Image (spheres, grey):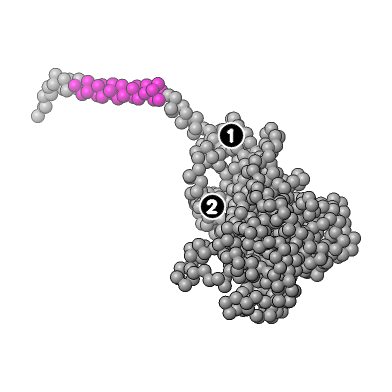
């Protein structure tokens, strides 16, 4: 049967469909045109900027770190550039497999692996971590040919810190290391400007001058605008704003004197601080043993860190700044000054010293034995314990505290490196706060007695003892100790002195200071240090001291041979010279070395000879000093200015850096 179609109806339906489709197409084209107009007109600038940012990258340029120099311009910290092989853990897949594969291309030692593991623990997964440093050109070329095999591994050119003299003055300089997570968190509280200046910076000062003058040494970060490929690789540099190197920090330290002192300590432990008493400039700041700060620059490996941190000799402890010790008999001159200032005892008052002092049923002995009647000058010269036992008893702990505090004992000196500790200048209030049990909080009169001879609760740093010595040397004028003399602007070359607070006059009467000086001079001319300073070309004043490392029972005879080495008495000495116009003041300790005149005073004598007479110990003299067997100099001293510099070890260290 033939179907009859309604042609008119079909055409009508077709036209309606065409119209609908046309409207849809026109609407689509309208929307497309509107979108194009929006993107190309309304958002043109924004999208053009995004396109440009996809094509280019802004890369921070880390500045060269500033130099550190000694007072004569000798470089103590510098920089060198080298290639490093770095892994970004989040991009590298299985790290062990990646490192194993890398060993087929480059040499990677077990130490490199240990250091990488330690650094990775302190880093985020998207931070690149060095696995090898100081790559040679041949090694760089060898890896470049195999790079496609190692996603997440790349070679970077980096600046490294170099300490050309190795362990020398390491506690003063400190070191730099990679910024750890705790430091990154702390940096979030910085001002925006300071934080922006550390974009791209991965290393920061950790201790000493490197830490305290971090922002001075860091410099200003620059930027480079780089054209990049679709894969994110840099193709060419489009524009650049160069980084500004960090400024140069100029120290008051005399590095040759520092080297002399460190050599004289040999393998022994201890600390020495040498001052210019008229300015507060620190001339030597020694803590022994030392450590090599270069170990930390590339990230110290676990084995080396364990060796340093677990050593019984504590090489990482800055003994001059953080080591606290009883001052022993070096405290007696300051006790005498306190007695004069407070009116508790005059210089001519005689005290009988029979070799013991009875108090509260206890007998406090004296190694000097029966020395008879002594006045204040002779009490210092002969180091009479009995004189100062009785003086401490008369003054009482709180008066001693109040008189000693202005001299800096138990106080923060304000030196320009961080980490200083107070030590303990005891008082009744201090004891109440220091202990928990009621019976411990009470101060007993018998505890005061030993304070007079620098024992008991007294514990101070060599920095504090050196500052107190310089106050006496300068007639009662107190200067803030400082290590940095000036800052040299890298761009302009301008040198600006670092401002120091005004000196403080403690108000001691000249006649009282003169009494103490006379007593200290007598120690050197006819007292315990007379043999050490025999034949010196200047007049020095000083005081020897011996301090207990462990407490001994009363009336127990000291026997060094019966004690472990770490339990033996410490040897101390404080001094200044020349007496009439002091140019240098020192305080030092040689741990567990016994008698101050035998182990400590000979070091001070050579320091004065160097500074005042341009003399350097002979080789035989140096050997005797290092084992505590020296008094006056042995053999003919060398001319200090003619002694070779840099020392052999320092030169070798400097040459090792590319």
x, y percentage for residue 204? 59, 48
Looking at this rendering, what residue extends furthest in the right direction?
Answer: 636
244 displayed left or right of 96: right
* Residue sitting at the far left: 1
List the residue tagged with mark 2: 180
**In the rendered image of this protein, does residue 22 appear above or below residue 597?**
above
**Residue closest to the eye, 601 or 292:** 601
Secondary structure under tag 2 reads loop
Identify the magenta region: 16-43
The stretch drawn in magenta includes residue 111: no
Residue 224: which numbered mark, if any? Answer: 1
Q: Residues within 10 Å of mark 1 (few under 14, many from 20)?
A: some
Q: Earlier in the sequence, mark 2 or mark 1?
A: 2
- Looking at the picture, how far across and down is residue 389, in whole percent? 64, 70
Q: Secondary structure at mark 1?
A: strand
Q: Which residue is drawn at the image coordinates 50% and 48% (left, top)?
A: 186
Place residue 517 in its image quadrant.
bottom right
Residue 25 part of the magenta segment: yes
Assign the N terminus to one quadrant of the image: top left
**Of residues 247 and 555, the one drawn nearer to the viewer in this rendering:** 555
Q: Assign the magenta stretch its main secondary structure.
A: helix
Determine whether 161 is above or below 109 in the image: above
Residue 171 spot, x, y in % from top left: 66, 56
Q: Quadrant of residue 469?
A: bottom right
User: Between 166 and 274, which is closer to the camera in this rendering?
Assistant: 274
Q: What is the number of the mark on residue 277?
A: none
Crowdedness of circle 2 by 10 Å Cα count: few (<14), some, many (20+)?
Answer: some
The percent coordinates of residue 343 (x first, y second) are: 63, 59
Q: Nearer the viewer, mark 2 or mark 1?
A: 2
Could you give the CA–CA distance between mark 2 and mark 1, rounded to whole angstroms?
26 Å
Q: Is residue 72 visible?
A: yes
């Amino acid at each position: 049967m033939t179907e009859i179609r309604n042609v008119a109806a079909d055409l009508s339906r077709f036209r309606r469909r065409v119209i609908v489709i046309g409207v849809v197409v026109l609407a689509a084209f309208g929307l497309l045109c509107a979108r194009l107009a929006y993107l190309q007109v309304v958002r043109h600038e924004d999208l053009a900027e995004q396109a440009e940012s996809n094509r280019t990258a802004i890369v921070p340029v880390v500045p060269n770190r500033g130099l550190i120099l000694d007072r004569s311009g000798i470089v103590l910290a510098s920089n060198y550039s080298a290639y490093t092989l770095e892994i970004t853990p989040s991009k590298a897949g299985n790290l062990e497999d990646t490192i194993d594969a890398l060993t087929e291309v480059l040499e990677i030692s077990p130490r490199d692996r240990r250091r990488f593991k330690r650094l990775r623990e302190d880093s985020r997964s998207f931070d690149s971590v060095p696995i090898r440093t100081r790559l040679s050109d041949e090694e760089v070329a060898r890896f470049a040919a195999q790079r496609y095999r190692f996603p997440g591994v790349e070679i970077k050119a980096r600046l490294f810190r170099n300490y050309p003299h190795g362990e020398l003055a390491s506690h003063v300089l400190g070191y730099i290391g990679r910024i750890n997570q705790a430091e990154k968190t702390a940096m979030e509280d910085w001002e925006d400007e300071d934080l922006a200046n550390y974009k791209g910076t991965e290393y920061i000062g950790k201790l000493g001058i490197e830490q305290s003058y971090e922002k001075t040494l860091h410099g200003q970060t620059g930027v480079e605008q780089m054209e990049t490929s679709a894969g994110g690789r840099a193709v060419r540099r489009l524009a650049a704003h160069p980084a500004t190197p960090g400024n140069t920090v100029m120290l008051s330290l005399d590095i040759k004197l520092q080297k002399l002192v460190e050599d004289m300590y040999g393998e022994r432990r201890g600390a020495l601080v040498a001052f210019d008493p008229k300015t507060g400039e620190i001339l030597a700041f020694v803590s022994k043993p030392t450590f090599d700060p270069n170990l930390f620059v590339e990230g110290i490996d676990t084995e080396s860190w364990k060796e340093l941190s677990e050593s019984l000799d504590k090489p990482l402890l800055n003994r001059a700044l953080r080591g606290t010790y009883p001052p022993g008999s070096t405290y007696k001159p300051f006790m005498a000054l306190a007695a004069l200032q407070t009116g508790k005892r005059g210089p001519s008052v005689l005290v009988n010293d029979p070799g013991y002092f009875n108090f509260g049923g206890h007998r406090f002995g004296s190694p000097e034995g029966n020395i008879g009647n002594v006045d204040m000058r002779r009490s210092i010269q002969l180091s009479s314990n009995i004189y100062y036992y009785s003086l401490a008893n008369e003054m009482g702990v709180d008066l001693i505290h109040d008189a000693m505090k202005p001299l800096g004992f138990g106080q923060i000196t304000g030196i320009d490196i961080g980490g200083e500790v107070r030590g303990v200048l005891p008082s009744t209030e201090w004891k109440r706060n220091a202990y928990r049990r009621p019976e411990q909080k009470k101060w007993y009169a018998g505890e005061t007695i030993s304070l007079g001879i620098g024992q008991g609760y007294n514990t101070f740093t060599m920095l504090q003892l050196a500052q107190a010595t310089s106050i006496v040397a300068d007639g009662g004028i107190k200067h803030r100790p400082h290590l940095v003399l000036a800052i040299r602007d890298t761009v302009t070359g301008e040198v600006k002195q670092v401002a120091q607070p005004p000196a403080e006059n403690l108000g001691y009467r000249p006649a009282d200071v003169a009494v103490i000086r006379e007593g200290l001079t007598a120690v050197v001319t006819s007292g315990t240090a007379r043999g050490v300073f025999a034949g010196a070309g200047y007049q020095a004043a000083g005081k020897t001291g011996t301090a207990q490392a462990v407490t001994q029972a009363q009336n127990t005879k000291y026997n060094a041979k019966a004690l472990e080495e770490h339990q033996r008495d410490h040897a101390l000495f404080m001094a200044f010279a020349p007496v009439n116009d002091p140019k240098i003041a020192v305080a030092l300790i040689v741990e567990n070395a016994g008698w101050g005149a035998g182990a400590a005073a000979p070091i001070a004598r050579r320091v004065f000879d160097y500074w005042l007479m341009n003399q350097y110990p002979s080789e035989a003299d140096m050997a005797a000093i290092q084992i505590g067997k020296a008094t006056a100099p042995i053999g003919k001293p060398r001319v200090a200015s003619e002694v070779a510099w840099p020392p052999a070890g320092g030169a070798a260290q400097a040459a090792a850096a590319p």
